């Protein structure tokens, strides 16, 4: 278990389990009160989310843990990379906007026409790339990745 931080006001410890899985997340647990949440983060988004794994943490405890996780997002990303050697972006679609890597939300992803004169034309969405493989560079807080079908290498800063 790799401890990230303690959150005294919530009585919780933030940590990454060494046997975990994608998507990137850390755990916040208060064993005295009997609860644990998972806090999800990304290398290509400023959004974090959570779900309750067990128990009944208060809204304030959840908010305090989320705030601490965001304050330590660089540590979370570095420890996830050091532990798992993946950023969990393989086959995800991303854009690089002003040098910053952003995951493309599902509703923005290109779709092919199902029938008609445009059925065989590829969708036109410039700068949307599908990640083939990626590596995190903690010192630079950036991702180096190769895009599917291009063989080209790209670098994008984590938000």
Image: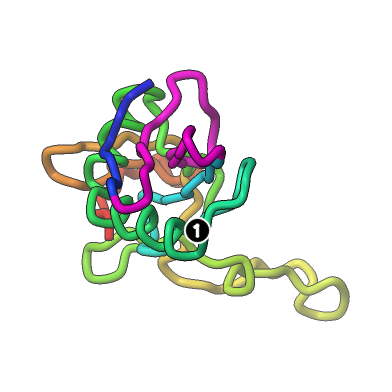
User: Looking at the image, can residue 149 be seen?
Assistant: no
Q: Where is residue 18 in the image (x, y as percent from the top left)?
A: 43, 20
The magenta stretch spans residue 142:
no
The residue positioned farthest toward the bottom in the image shown? 117
Q: Position of residue 126 (x, y in %)?
A: 45, 71
Give left or right: position of 25 versus 44: right
- Tell me: residue 85, above or below residue 100: above
Question: For this rendering, which residue is in front, 69 or 57?
Answer: 57
The residue positioned farthest toward the front in the image shown? 32
Report the span colored magenta. 9-34
Question: For this rendering, which residue is in front, 54 or 92?
Answer: 54
- Tell me: residue 97, above or below residue 15: below
The residue positioned farthest toward the right in the image shown? 115
Report the residue at 53% width, 50% height from top: 92
The magenta stretch spans residue 33:
yes
- In this figure, which colouring scheme has been used for the structure? rainbow
Quarter of the image that includes the C terminus: bottom left
- Tell me: residue 103, above or below residue 8: below
Give left or right: position of 141 versus 146: left
Report the residue at 48% width, 49% height from top: 40
Report the residue at 35% width, 41% height from top: 145
Q: Position of residue 73 (x, y in %)?
A: 28, 49
| Residue pointed to by mark 1 | 49
Q: Where is residue 56 in the image (x, y as percent from the top left)?
A: 61, 51
Give left or right: position of 7 versus 118: left
Rendering quarter of residue 116: bottom right
User: Looking at the image, can residue 45 be seen?
Assistant: yes
- Tell me: residue 47, above or below residue 1: below
Rendering quarter of residue 78: top left
């Amino acid at each position: 278990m790799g401890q990230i931080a303690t959150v005294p006001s919530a009585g919780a410890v933030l940590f990454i389990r060494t046997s975990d899985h994608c998507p990137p997340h850390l755990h916040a647990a208060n064993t005295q009160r009997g609860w644990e949440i998972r806090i999800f983060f990304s290398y290509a988004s400023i959004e974090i989310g959570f779900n309750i794994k067990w128990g009944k943490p208060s809204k304030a405890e959840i908010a305090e843990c989320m705030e601490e996780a965001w304050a330590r997002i660089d540590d979370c990303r570095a420890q996830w990379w050091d532990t798992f050697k993946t950023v969990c972006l393989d086959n995800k679609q991303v854009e690089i906007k002003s040098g910053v890597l952003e995951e493309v939300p599902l509703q923005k992803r290109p779709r092919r026409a199902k029938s008609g004169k445009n059925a065989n034309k590829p969708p036109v969405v410039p700068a949307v790339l599908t990640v083939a493989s990626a590596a995190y560079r903690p010192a630079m807080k950036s991702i180096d990745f190769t895009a599917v079908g291009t063989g080209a290498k790209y670098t994008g800063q984590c938000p």
